[in-house]
Amino acid sequence: MQFLISMHINPAVLEALTEEEMAAVGEGHGRFIAALKESGELVNTQALVDPSQAVVVTVRNGQPAVTDGPFLEAKEYLGGFYLVDVEDKDRAVALAAQIPDAAIAGLGVEVRQVMFYDGLPEA
Amino acid sequence: MTAGPAEGLLRELAPQVLGALVRRHGRFEDCEDAVQEAVIAAAAQWPAQGVPGNPRGWLVTVASRRLVDQVRGDHARRARESAVAAAEAPGDVPGRDDTLALLFLCCHPALTGASQTALTLRAAGGLTTAEIARAFLVPEATMAARISRAKQRIRAAGASFTWPAGDELAGRLPVVLHVLYLIFNEGYTASAGADLHRPDLAAEAIRLARMVHAQLPADGEVTGLLALMLLTHARRAARVTAAGDLVPLGEQDRARWDAVMTAEGMELARVSLGAPSLGPYQLQAAIAATHADAATAAGTNWAQVHALYLILERVAPNPVVTLNRAVALAEVKGPAAGLELLAGLDGDERVAGHHRLLSVRAHLLEQAGDTAGAYDCYRRAARATASLAEQRYLQGRASRVRPAGGQPGAEG
């Protein structure tokens, strides 16, 4: 079954990390990706640009409007995700615990099962 | 499975060829790769050039040369040699069917269920990695890594390619049957995605179960599993509407059940019950046969269904079995008796909060006339399921019993 493991980042928390700590986070993700590829559990992973680059689209009375709010007011943002295909929820939770972000105070990693899927798998 | 004649033949021959190679050379990992390459080569050549006179011999020859190449690491000679192999008519290597030995290796207890199913489909089912990846909606590279890891684990566990016998057979056959059951269920419940070219896993599981049954025709559980699969698969056309909505058993148009498949399943279920011991697949097949025996849902012999679930609860205790027994009990003694049985499951963390418990309770509350309670349970069940089709069905039931003044559009 497939799970989306999403990383909720807080820019203030990330900015407070030392350079060594940031490097350790990056290396941790690298090792995590390599292990997931080898075990045959990784479907894909994506990281998103800084929330300051995001826009919010709304359509009111048929008129689209592009603004930078209101989600910019939030403290936590979706920073990126891992889409994994695993045995069960316990395994997905165990994997989430290996993500470096999970060990940083102020950050959280969320695990949710995928219910609907469509697209063009490369297979 | 919409396989052409060449593909059907390939899937049948692949495990035999792999068995022949492993018996001659050992090295399951390498042989398995070599057979996969031979299968891919045959799938490309046979439809255009015709199936060779001795297809098994062709595959054995091509796979053997791929194996030699792999071992030597001599990739340059491959193309030349497969042309030579196609021209030759090598002597066949008849021997006993190795399918069972292969299945026991693929379903090794050191592997996870996901790895067992993938490796079984490739080594015993003759499917390509690309086909298996499509069936499970994952990228081919993901599936290739999973299969390769599974083979490493098998080697690390020191597993050997042998025909299991005696206690070993009795101990490990249930694992093999469980893997086939998992493959069947994956095909039966899969709802995600637009799947025009998705291999039919339910049909593949039935084909593999037939292969095991051919080897062990006297085993009651093997016969029972095949019967259960056939009786369930026979209902597939009546199970979903054209719009993709689920139709529960009680509301299915039984004229749309596959009569030939049902008849075969009924006969196998009957035969399986004559075996000296009684296991969970035989009992589930007997329950499915009881449903198939009724011309209409109203004509169902619920007392017999309930009695069979009682035995199943004793043979293989499991809260999901109790859940199903509650449905039968409600039909025999009324919804209150069913609800009382369900109350005992609330403390079982394996099902408490599970959408099946919530939806069965909702059904029984609806039958008992408690529409407010049913509405609440249907909505909670809809939120708890991971299947979109099930969610739509449960939301539909909820809106049917929505009490006056209930907030419309608040579902989900």
Image: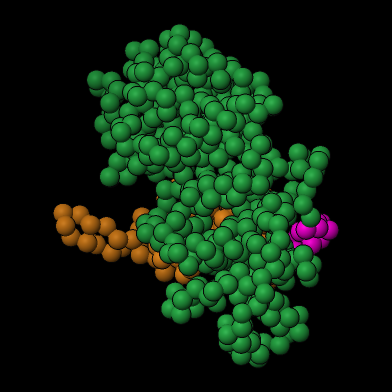
Q: Is residue B315 above or below residue A1?
A: above
Nearer to us in this view, B21 or B106: B21
The range drawn in magenta is B152-161
Q: Quadrant of the C terminus of chain B?
A: top left
Q: Position of residue B201 (x, y in %)?
A: 50, 52
Q: Is residue B242 visible?
A: yes
Q: Is B184 within the magenta?
A: no
Residue shown at 26% from the left, 31% from the top:
B408
Q: Position of residue B274 (x, y in %)?
A: 62, 26
Q: Is residue B81 above or below residue B237?
A: below
Nearer to us in this view, A12 or B394: B394
Judging from the image, what is the letter of the chain drawn in orange?
Answer: A
Q: Position of residue A16 (x, y in %)?
A: 63, 63
Residue shown at 57% from the left, 47% from the top:
B210
Q: Return the residue found at the far left.
A: A61
Residue shown at 71% from the left, 66% from the top:
B20
Nearer to us in this view, B22 or A120: B22
Q: Quadrant of the N terminus of chain B?
A: bottom left
Judging from the image, what is the letter of the chain drawn in green?
Answer: B
Residue shown at 60% from the left, 75% from the top:
B58
Number of marks drawn? 0
Left or right side of A17 for B237: left
Left or right side of B282 for B188: left
Q: Quadrant of residue B62?
A: bottom right
Nearer to us in this view, B112 or B252: B252
Q: Quadrant of residue B224?
A: top right
Q: Is residue B395 visible?
A: no
Q: Position of residue B120 (x, y in %)?
A: 63, 56
Q: Is residue A21 above or below residue B212?
A: below
